[in-house]
Image (tube, rainbow, N blue to C red):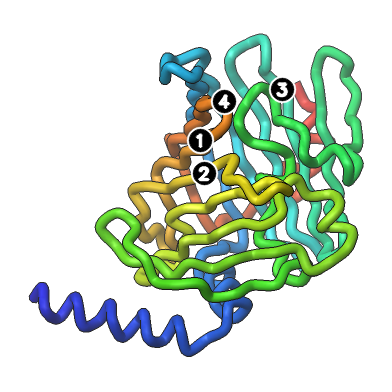
Amino acid sequence: MKIITVCLMLIASMSAFAEDGRQLMERSEETTKSLTEKSLFQMDIFDQDKKLVQSRDMEFFYKHGADKEVSLIKFISPPILQGTGLLIEDRNKEVNDIWLYLPATRKLRRISGSEKTNWFMGTEFTHEDFEDYKINLYKFSLVKEAACGDSRCIVVLAEPDNNHEREASGYSKKLYYIDISSQYPAAIEYFDHSGGLIKRLTTSGIRKEGDYWRPQVITMENMVNKRVTQLTIKERVLDITLDDYYVSSRYLRAD
């Protein structure tokens, strides 16, 4: 059985390298992106000594419409953060529309392109980390095959191929470790404009849920300050009928 498994992985690997980097990323997006998603995450923030600083609960909604893709993140605990949220609209343009809502001011503020590198609510994620592959704005190159945990990955180099994205992004390049069997990113490495590795995102517990692959834990580690933000799935449903209200500014403003 082990020999058969190894052979299947080798066939999958050869198939992946028969594609170019862009084709592989397109296939990854196609096979892992659902039409809708409604999820609840526990977010844990750790300091440089890996001591827990704060735990939060966070809602996530996603909907793939005819002319746009919309993602909404909203904190439901602790009380000091309850209601704070982020709304991202991707209309396949150079710049995604991103709005931040702060209950204390009861104002919805649009995040400009130059602000997308800002840290999100004390986490190791920036606003742009919540965007998708943005395939039309990047060039992708196959680098190598590598081990990733108990699986094998194809490593893909992503570099901005658009002047606006090149100037607005906080990263000069990213390395995607695409799991051969699931096509889901097992890891993403982020490099600053000097070429240094500054962050690493890893996923674990990747499993199939319905027609799609999803991780159970997402970990973002800052390689500079050594702090970590970890997302652990608590509830998730895919391809449900999702009202537009849950991916709108009205839901962000709702108490």
Q: Which residue is mark 4?
A: 225
Q: Which residue is mark 1?
A: 221
| Residue positioned 66% across, 57% down in the render | 173
Q: Nearer the viewer, residue 177 or 102?
A: 177
Which image quadrant for residue 25? bottom right
Asked if labels 1 and 3 touch by Cβ distance under 8 angstroms, the answer is no
Asked if labels 2 and 3 touch by Cβ distance under 8 angstroms, the answer is no
Dot 3: few (<14), some (14–19), or many (≥20) neighbours within 10 Å?
Answer: many
Q: Which residue is mark 2?
A: 200
Q: Nearer the viewer, residue 220 or 218?
A: 220
**Mark 4 element type:** loop
Q: Earlier in the sequence, mark 3 or mark 1?
A: 3
Q: Nearer the viewer, mark 3 or mark 4?
A: 4
Residue 9 in the image: above or below residue 35: below
| Residue positioned 28% across, 77% down in the render | 9
Amino acid carrying mark 2 in the image = Arg
Q: Nearer the viewer, residue 255 or 124?
A: 124
Asked if labels 1 and 4 touch by Cβ distance under 8 angstroms, the answer is no
| Residue positioned 44% across, 38% down in the render | 233
Asked if labels 2 and 1 touch by Cβ distance under 8 angstroms, the answer is yes
Mark 4 to mark 1 CA distance (whole Å):
9 Å
Asked if labels 4 and 3 touch by Cβ distance under 8 angstroms, the answer is no
Which image quadrant for residue 158? bottom right
Q: Earlier in the sequence, mark 3 or mark 2?
A: 3
**Mark 3 element type:** loop
Question: Of the numbered discs in the image, which one, if any, rests on residue 83?
Answer: 3
**Mark 1 element type:** strand
Residue 103 in the image: above or below residue 25: above
Dot 1: few (<14), some (14–19), or many (≥20) neighbours within 10 Å?
Answer: many
Amino acid carrying mark 4 in the image = Asn
Q: Position of residue 125 (x, y in %)?
A: 63, 36
Q: Earlier in the sequence, mark 3 or mark 4?
A: 3
